[in-house]
Image (cartoon, grey):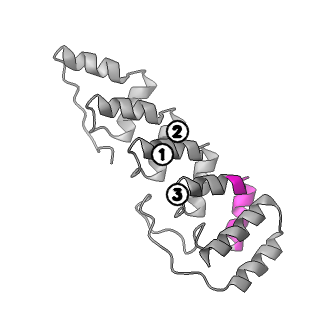
Amino acid sequence: MAEERWKVLEMLAAGTISVEQADQLLEAIGPQPSPRTDIRSNTTPPTRTAGIGITVEELIELREHDVDADYLHAVRSAGFSGLSVEQIIELHEHEVDADYLKALRDAGFSELRIEQVVELREHDVDADYLRAIRDAGFTDLSVEQIVELREHDVDADYLQAMRKHGIDVLFAGPKLA
């Protein structure tokens, strides 16, 4: 049943069907399954989430934010099918695409909250930068610290050179999950 709801969402986002037709199709499909907990945001998602079931109002909200079927499909294919409509819109508004999500996941950063992903994207922190920092031995940095380093062109080579010459770089604060 979740797959049928997803197809309705994709058809509406693509403009293949109207909001009224989407509403009729969703009613014909029947009630949605119980919502799952969203492990990426450490919160309980809204009653209906993309891929499980979605309200007509949420479909309209996606349309108003220019979230199309291709974007939804790409994000879902990247392994992010349990996101709320609000999270999908936030990712889209901050130009977080499926390739960026896949790169973070493939680099071992799959436990980031949506807010952290957006912050990293907004400051041009890519998976290669994160991987280099981690591989240099700096595994206890917060997202805020990584962003600060990136903003000031501090890379893994610079951090390693400091450490090589006996300068310990101390980081305090919440750590990157």
Q: Is residue 23 above or below residue 174?
A: below
Kind of element beneath mark 3: loop
Q: Is residue 43 above or below residue 157?
A: below
Identity, as a three-letter code, of the amino acid under mark 3: Phe
Residue range of the region highlighted in magenta in the rendering? 56-70
Residue that mark 3 sits on: 80
CA gap, disc 2 to disc 3? Answer: 16 Å
Where is residue 38 shown, x and y percent of the image?
45, 65
Kind of element beneath mark 1: helix
Q: Is residue 57 covered in magenta?
A: yes
Q: Is residue 131 above or below residue 15?
A: above
> Is residue 131 visible in this depiction of the protein?
yes
Identity, as a three-letter code, of the amino acid under mark 2: Arg
> Is residue 54 visible in this depiction of the protein?
no
Front residue (pair 109, 159): 109
Front residue (pair 122, 28): 28
Where is residue 138 shown, x and y percent of the image?
27, 32
Residue that mark 1 sits on: 117
Front residue (pair 170, 29): 29
Residue name at image x 71 percent, y 57 percent: 69
Q: Is residue 45 above or below residue 69?
A: below
Q: Main secondary structure of the magenta part?
A: helix
Residue that mark 2 sits on: 121
Q: Is residue 155 left or right of residue 47?
A: left
* The disc label shown at residue 34, or none: none
